[in-house]
Image (spheres, coloured by chain):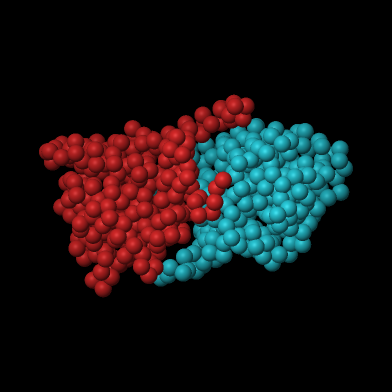
Chain colours: A red, B cyan
Amino acid sequence: MRTNNNQDHDVPKDHPRYESLKYRHDIIEGMKKLVVAEAGLIAHGRGECFDYMLGERTSDIAKEAIEAAVALLYLAKHPIISINGNTAALCPEALTELSKILDAPLEINLFYRKEGRIEAIKKVLEDAGAERILGLDESKMVEIEELSSNRRNVDPDGIKIADVVFVPLEDGDRTEALKKIGKEVIAVDLNPISRTSLWADITIVDNVIRTVPEMIRIAEKLKNAKNKDLKNIIDKFDNIKNIQASLDVIIQYIQKQKEDAFNILKQ
Amino acid sequence: MRTNNNQDHDVPKDHPRYESLKYRHDIIEGMKKLVVAEAGLIAHGRGECFDYMLGERTSDIAKEAIEAAVALLYLAKHPIISINGNTAALCPEALTELSKILDAPLEINLFYRKEGRIEAIKKVLEDAGAERILGLDESKMVEIEELSSNRRNVDPDGIKIADVVFVPLEDGDRTEALKKIGKEVIAVDLNPISRTSLWADITIVDNVIRTVPEMIRIAEKLKNAKNKDLKNIIDKFDNIKNIQASLDVIIQYIQKQKEDAFNILKQ
């Protein structure tokens, strides 16, 4: 029997929803540790819904975007990885490893400030092996003019001087602001038509828990690639076409469900 | 500037996302008051995603299901309305009003038990004007054999003897169990292909915050209808076709977004 303090993590490993329930549990625990904002739970639910319609797998279309993203991060002078509560709760180790391979520091950048939240996220990242974490000292932050939320404050050694910003899970206002001040933006977003997805230069329509390990694999593969070849990967990539192809994946999924609706009922 | 304790309810009324943000706020506040489980926030997010793809409006297809639902509830000998944390947080007044019009008692029935949760939900319903609330006295509960979760416990004066159970927002296991013990089930679910949606006799694919007021309107309209006419409404209704039509609404929405993707970017 389920008990209140044990909402999901008593799920057996062979449960068909094990992966999804495990990450749901991580998000809930993250909230209890101040890492995740309450609104982050709702955002996670929206993501679950889109991931469901993407078949909960990284499509070949997403893999193309991932390759372009890694190429752009390798070509950047000052790449940076922006961290929020949900990404810290979901995949701190993978993000830390990616940060090291790409030589792109992690910057904590939050929408919902709360006493102790930055420290809680810092601890999660340090436990995951992170050595260089930016965005910690609020007194040193500088403002991005384009932004009205808390996140207008960015680290002078991080997003402020970055040319390429990797924002796994981001809200639309901020992505738009980063574009307006001339940054190249790489986003991971399960919603192909969010404002973040539409504003980003490279939009990876995928679940961040699968994306980041895949980015690590691609980064290893491209480690010794020539700049010319990296540029070629980016030139061949068309973000709008990629987003539209992701929407096709969703449409096909729902079409299939529609055809199966009666059969599913009879199982 | 946003502050942590004020995540959403400082949104101005003319904000295009006002409604959605208001209910998001109600769910978060509901969690703080023990009414809503942590997992209820994630479930709310999944709902937001589907509602977005349904255009955040009650389709004519959903209205057909609502009419059939009201007819079935009027024809029932022992209709009952099952209440969980999310519905109590989102629309307690409307559910209370519906309960009175249909003479169908409210029964609190929770998946995640927690000390004080039933009392918290009872208070919300009483504040909304509810007079008859079942599911309060755990010592009197009886078990549904088909269910392994906490919700196998049902009120002997409520779900146990009910012929028609209205479950706005429900999980698949329970809907299936209610069907297996011979109940007729009416569900509200934004996911047209959830197990609840597929198992229910009448599935209203819509947001509960719009559905219940619409049910009240229809209940007023059908108040003096003859049983023959109510039966006729039910006979004409085909749940699988209705679900498939809701899936078409979603497909059309995504198709449109796909066509608009480039234009949206340029706005």
From the top left corner, tell me how far across and down residue B71 is, in percent: 78, 43
Name the residue located 69 percent from the left edge and 67 percent from the top edge: B127
Name the residue located 34 percent from the left edge and 57 percent from the top edge: A84
Residue found at the far front of this picture: B139
From the top left corner, tell me how far across and down residue A136 is, in percent: 26, 66
Name the residue located 47 percent from the left edge and 31 percent from the top edge: A252
Return the residue nearer the eye: B86 or B16.
B86
Quarter of the rendering occupied by the N terminus of chain B: bottom left
Return the residue nearer the eye: A116 or B97.
A116
Return the residue nearer the eye: A168 or A68.
A168
Q: In this picture, is A206 found above or below A144?
A: above
Residue found at the far bottom of this picture: A139
Name the residue located 21 percent from the left edge and 47 percent from the top edge: A73
Quadrant location of residue A247?
A: top left
From the top left corner, tell me how far across and down residue A246 is, in percent: 40, 37
- Can residue B44 be seen? no
From the top left corner, tell me how far across and down residue B52 is, in percent: 52, 48
Task: From the viewer's perspective, tell me whether residue B126 is left or right of residue A161.
Answer: right
